[in-house]
Image (cartoon, rainbow, N blue to C red):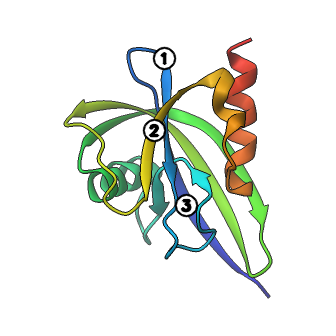
């Protein structure tokens, strides 16, 4: 049986209506693919506490979780991921790539120009469809 993990990811939009996209480093699983930043939910942790903690660790900034944007389960070859994408607003600091190779801000309609990790694709599609 495959291991199942619960992961939170932040959908962070700036004042220019651009979405923060993070490039996975060559050392990470799914190297050189794009994702929304975040990480595993720890035992007895709610998704809002998890996203606040993960973004502080990964990006060095404080966010305010706003709402659950997308809940999707994706089966990879070796594990199953339940990806919970949470809409967030930056409260303090500027996102910095501490674990990722690169961070970029993109307009919703340009999100498909990146090679996304498969689990993130449903949220990407939903973001693009909202902009139409």
Q: Is residue 88 above or below residue 42?
A: above
Q: Earlier in the sequence, mark 2 or mark 1?
A: 1
Q: Residue at x 31, y 38 (%)?
A: 63
Considering every residue shown, the one lying at the far left of the view is 92
Q: Determine the residue positioned at 27% across, 52% down.
A: 56
Task: Looking at this view, name the residue that lies furthest to the top.
Answer: 132
Disc 3 is placed on an element classified as strand
Q: What's the CA distance linking mark 2 and mark 1?
A: 13 Å
Instruction: Determine which residue is flagged by label 2.
Output: 104
Residue 7's tag is 3
The residue mark sitting in front, 2 or 1, is 2
Q: Secondary structure at mark 1?
A: loop
Q: Is residue 122 above or below residue 8?
A: above
Q: Quadrant of residue 1?
A: bottom right
Which residue shows up at 68% across the image and 15% down it? 131
**Sequence order check: which comes first, mark 3 or mark 1?**
3
Image location of residue 14, percent across then percent down: 40, 23
Q: Residues within 10 Å of mark 3 (few under 14, many from 20)?
A: many
């Amino acid at each position: 049986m495959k291991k199942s993990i619960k992961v939170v990811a932040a959908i962070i939009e700036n004042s220019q209506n651009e979405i923060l996209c993070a490039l996975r480093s060559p050392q990470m699983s799914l190297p050189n693919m794009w994702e929304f930043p975040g990480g595993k939910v720890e035992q007895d942790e709610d998704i809002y506490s998890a996203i606040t903690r993960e973004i502080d660790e990964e990006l060095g900034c404080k966010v305010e979780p706003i709402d659950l944007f997308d809940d999707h389960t994706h089966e990879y070859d070796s594990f199953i991921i339940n990806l919970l994408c949470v809409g967030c607003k930056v409260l303090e600091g500027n996102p910095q790539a501490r674990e990722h190779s690169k961070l970029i801000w993109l307009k919703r309609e340009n999100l498909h120009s990146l090679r996304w990790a498969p689990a993130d694709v449903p949220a990407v599609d939903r973001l693009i469809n909202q902009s139409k």
